[in-house]
Amino acid sequence: MPELGEVEIVRRNLEKWWVNQSAKQVVILDGDVFSSGQDRFETTMTQVAVKAGRRGKYLFVTFANANVIVFHFRMTGKITLEATPDARFMRVAWQVDDGWLSFKDARRLGHIDVFSAEEFENYQPIAKMGPEPFDITGAQLKERAGRRILKSALMDQSVIAGVGNIAVSEVFWRLRLAPDIMAAQLTEIQWDELASGISDFFSEVIEVDEADEIEYVNQGGPNTFDVYGRLGEPCPRCKTIIARQKIGGRSSYYCPTCQSAAA
DNA sequence: TAGTCTGTTAGACA
DNA sequence: CTGTCTAACAGACT
């Protein structure tokens, strides 16, 4: 579920489903999901969950004993609530008042860590992460991005937290930025538009996609985006056929007319 | 079928 | 340090 908006939706769901309770039963179906702390997982899960938090694309739950369990979904991970759990793709499951929560991950790229409070403080991916999109100005974004290809800079989590491949395609289309534009080419006004555009995009995702289970465009879910995943379809603005180009190893979808380099 | 795609990111390399 | 590429993995689509 991977970009910031979807992770935030799961965080809110966990606040409803899990916080103020402890797991009644815990089942580990695939111990490989732990990149650290498997030996502390079950004892931590017996504690009451105090808070569900998020930084960028990382989701974490803080427990009564101050331990923190961190979830990262990578490409295809999710947390579901089911009355009768379906074991397909399930890696870990735990029972709460409303049913069974489980971490599911078809591609098995996601991971879980169990940290003490101090270890969590020092967890580098979060410690080094840039500001949340809701808390950054255009000028700050410009300074942090440096002089790289803009897309690469935005996807660097230490520049700004939570931006992924879909957000880049969608926000670039809205602002009419060419997919391969360099950071140094943006005007001050465009930096401001970019900072607010990213923040608006995530706010909308959270609003539109809020649901008990996240659906992925690439796994049969509906495509609610303007250009992402729409190769060969007409641009919603000008009807030019949407193209695709790899930038920094990741596909960018864009309108060759609206998003010309000169713009 | 076989090849190509996929919402991520750490680590290897130039 | 910077940027670029790949692996990790498994399923869906062409």
Image: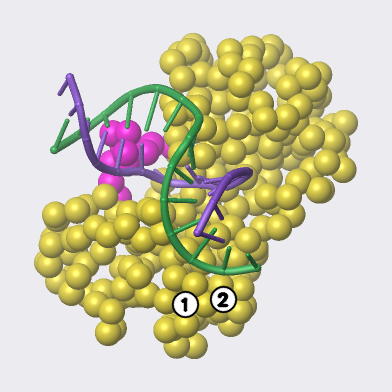
Chain colours: A yellow, B purple, C green
Camera-side residue of A258 and A184 = A184
Question: What's the CA distance linking mark 1 and mark 2?
Answer: 7 Å
Which label belongs to residue A183? 1
For the view shown, which residue lies furthest in the bottom direction?
A: A188
What amino acid is labelled 2 in the image? Gly
- Residue A223 counted in the magenta span: yes
Chain of residue at mark 2: A
Majority secondary structure of magenta residues: loop
Which label belongs to residue A146? 2
What amino acid is labelled 1 in the image? Ala
- Residue A91 counted in the magenta span: no
Camera-side residue of A117 and A256 = A256
Label 1: state its secondary structure. Answer: helix
Label 2: state its secondary structure. Answer: loop
> Do circles 1 and 2 both sit on a common chain?
yes
Q: Position of residue A74 (x, y in %)?
A: 51, 39
Q: Are marks 1 and 2 in contact (CB under 8 Å)?
A: yes
The region drawn magenta spans A212-224
Please tell me which of labels 1 and 2 falls first in the chain. Answer: 2
Q: Position of residue A161 (x, y in %)?
A: 59, 58
